[in-house]
Amino acid sequence: MSSSIKSLLAAALCAAGLVHAGDLPEPVTRLMQSSGIPLEAAGIVVMRGDATLVSHNATQVMQPASTMKLFTAMTALEQLGPVFRGRTEFRTSADVVNGVLQGDLILRGGADTDLNEDALSHMLQALRNQGIRKIKGDIVVDRLLFQPTRPDAGQPPFDEYPWAYYNVIPNAALVNTNLLKVEMRSTADKLSLVMTPELDKVTIRSEMKLSDAACAAWENGWRSPDYARKGDRIEVVLHGSFPKDCAKSTSINVLDSQDYLARLLLAEWRKQGGSLTGEVREATAPAAVTRLLAEHVSRTLPEVLRDTNKQSDNTLARTVFLSLGSLEADAALGSRPLAANTVSAANGDATAASTAMRAETAIRAWLQQHNIDGNGLILDNGSGLSRTERATPAQLAGVLQAGLKSLWAPEFLASLPIAATDGTMRRRLKDSPAAQRARLKTGSLTGVIAIAGYVPDASNQPCIVVAILNDPHVANGAGRAVLDALVDWVARN
């Protein structure tokens, strides 16, 4: 913990009329006791200006869940800047002769969070507009911006829902967040499926049994999907049961990301009348000097962070986290200069630190610049979807203090969910004076519930509020009720 925060906490211990450090507001204590949540399972800090109103286990190392995204967001805003964008490029070193690209087409991934089938289609159309109708070589997918290039490879499933969107692990050339949208429509005796986007030689079938369950409860019969290879074809298979006379849609992450991108590229290129002599393969080393043929850039960082924090999007947070490490690699490895704060691919170095390690270095350096003690902080992927990440309430309070003083404070505040209004806070605190005023990042895992952000008090003075509960008894809304009681108490006092 920084010396400034230590002095504030010490001053609070002696301040007359304030809640003494270690004490908690009565509504909070009462709800914790009634739910069986022990006091030692809570870490809470409430600050107003230079005064600490509540400090309970402020330096206790805890699982922060998705409040960890605040470390990633603030460091990214100040280190990458508000005009930072990810970029996807088509490049080549080959000539075009009579409509034929005489060599490989390189798809260079640059952590483009908005890369989808429409963007890819427009990039391929740009090739056709330049007269290219045939690629006499391979399409080479360059993911070398991140090391390892496939962070998902060999990773065990985080939980029993590996197909769910929140579990998607990004790479530098992730398209459509690797999701397949599946529309399911049933009658009394038949289930019809439609899968989008269209992928080359990929089909879907169902092994789901029709049931008499209510349509609204369809997820109760859902089981993890998988896929099977049959030669050069892939068949996605759905399992479980589905209600009769029901129509629902869902998105699944089931295919390997290289399969997904390769087959999407082939489908889109052929739709536009293009042909490919070779195959779609992954790059193992950076290409020699190439020229740009087409590109797509993502939205700016503040826009991406709004989706990241308001919806607690783990895949976006992990992409931003790795982008911090990839830019440091670019500088260290002396790769081609960055233009307009966009990501470019680094020259891979197998002996260099991983991109995640470099991202951690960037965040720790930022903490040090702001006199926030990093002791006890454990970073894994920067999203909070981790069983190893740890932080203290005091560290989160320090990040929030720095956020208020930052040049990019408006962008940071705009990324946080608003109580009773949007994001993960849209259904909370509707009957509290905190409604439409408090901006709070939420976090939850099994046995973990947390909030961190800003709550105006009764005098409309902004207060920093951080609260983390680590205990199995936080389940079934009990922990959320405790945290909402704390926010309500701050807003009323």
Image (spheres, grey):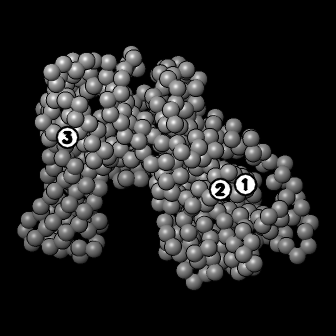
The Cα–Cα distance between marks 1 and 2, rounded to whole angstroms, is: 7 Å
Amino acid type assigned to the residue bearing label 2 in the image: Ala
Residue 316: % across, % down: 46, 48
Q: In the depicted view, which residue is nearer to us: 11 or 88?
A: 88
Q: Which residue has dot 3 on it?
A: 268
Residue 365: % across, % down: 69, 37
Circle 2 Cα neighbour tier, 10 Å, few/some/many (<14 / 14–19 / ≥20) = some
SS class, disc 1: helix
SS class, disc 3: helix
Name the residue: 75% across, 59% down. Answer: 57
Q: Quadrant of the C terminus?
A: bottom right
Name the residue: 26% across, 68% down. Answer: 218
337 is higher (above) or lower (below) than 229: above
131 is higher (above) or lower (below) than 301: above
SS class, disc 2: helix
CB of mark 1 within 8 Å of CB of mark 2?
A: yes
The Cα–Cα distance between marks 1 and 3, rounded to whole angstroms, is: 47 Å
Q: Which residue has dot 1 on it?
A: 405
